Image: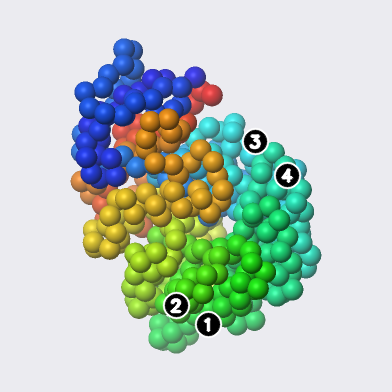
Amino acid sequence: MTESLVITGARLLGDERVDIVVEEGVIAEMGTGLSRHGARVIDGDGLIALPGLVDLHTHLREPGFEASETVLTGTQAAAAGGFTAVFAMPNTSPVADSAGVVEQELALGEAAGYATVQPIGAVTVGQKGERLAELGAMASSRAQVRVFSDDGFCVFDPLIMRRALEYVKSFGGVIAQHAQDPRLTEGAQMNEGVVSAELGLAGWPAVAEESIIARDVLLAEHVGSRLHVCHLSTAGSVDIIRWAKKRGVNVTAEVTPHHLLLTDELVRGYDARYKVNPPLRREEDVVAVREGLADGTIDIVATDHAPHPSENKACEWQAAANGMVGLESALRVVHQTMVQTGLIGWTDVARVMSATPARIGMLSGHGTPLQEGSPAQITLYDPSREGTFTTSDLHGRSENSPYLGRDLPGRVEWTIHHGLVTVAEGLVAQELSA
């Protein structure tokens, strides 16, 4: 059962102070001087009220890789970061390439209760790039899948990519591409550039990302279908997306928090927490993706939360797994890189971390403005806090965060999902009742 809540004096999108009354999982009233008999009162003084955050790119690992993460622990991490909905990538075991697996993931999310879990279906069977998966069956299943991706692998065959774009067009779906030419990145260990040359590590060139994006926007234009570019990371990719949007191509793109902040200079210490795909890029790329997010070329921020057991990271660089956890730190990194720098405001944060990812993924009940009658998906964030990011900030099963020991602003104080408090005063709820 959800409880009645009264949030007092929170700053709506960082602007005017407002009281918010939540009843039966819905925002019942907004105004000033509001109260409800018997309601739980949340002091919102100094807190920014945002619509619940939505992550279009999360790896929850279950089924098959529960040593790294489960749907339960992953959604607890999501709640700690202010997320009320996450889209679960299909690289599980078995791969989410059928109606049965995506419905299983949906059920696990419903049972956990910390955040809405919307499965993403694989584009190809087993993510092998050889033949299309059961796109129609997943779309018509109880999971109502609308986003399809082989993330971790590029849909490299242009004919298969074309057929996928054509297929999902019939029900308004979208193909989310991991843009990586596999031939140009064979054996790659980090970004190709000055640092890789000095360290003697095989490079992952920017053109391996940019060439796939260029091909796919042309295919999307030809087919008249929807394309989404995962974890865009280079200045050239920003230019291609900007060009495509000017042509009217129906393309959207995401950037991760780590590509907004971190550079390949961090690889010099051979700390595998900084090993990720696509790799950390140059400072010039960081500047470009920030500008692209600020001007709307890049549509959203998505975490690419990728948990791994410690043994997969506490090893030599070449043997280490790619990926970083990012759900708990995402809003704080966006605060630091985009808001404190003056590039965007809190209304924009709500757009790129809530409204637009929900729209791209066609997820109802999320990403809606905080107004009377809307579902009570609310994140209350304290921008005045400042602290060192530590393992105590992590709530999933893995600790492969690149931000450990780094000072980050802000803290998520409260997360409310369908009117149910999942995070209270910075602490994740221990038990939830449906």
Q: Type of residue at label 2?
A: Asp
* Mark found first going from the N terminus, 3 or 4: 3
Q: Is residue 271 visible?
A: no
Residue 308 in sight = yes
Residue type highlighted by circle 4: Ser
Q: Is residue 107 left or right of residue 200?
A: right
**Amino acid, disc 1:** Val
The first of marks 4 and 1 along the sequence is 4
The label shown at residue 207 is 1
Which residue type does callout 3 highlight? Ala
Q: Which residue is mark 3?
A: 107
Comparing labels 4 and 1, the label whose residue is closer to the camera: 4
Cα distance in 3D space between marks 3 and 1: 40 Å
The residues tagged by marks 2 and 1 sit, at their Cα atoms, a distance apart of 12 Å
Image coordinates of residue 236 in percent, x first then y, are 45, 79
Q: Secondary structure at mark 2?
A: helix
Q: CA distance from mark 3 to mark 4?
A: 16 Å
Residue at horizontal 56%, vertical 48%? 362
Residue 76: numbered disc? none
Query: What is the number of the mark on residue 140?
Result: 4
Q: Nearer the viewer, residue 319 or 146?
A: 146
Q: Which residue is mark 2?
A: 239
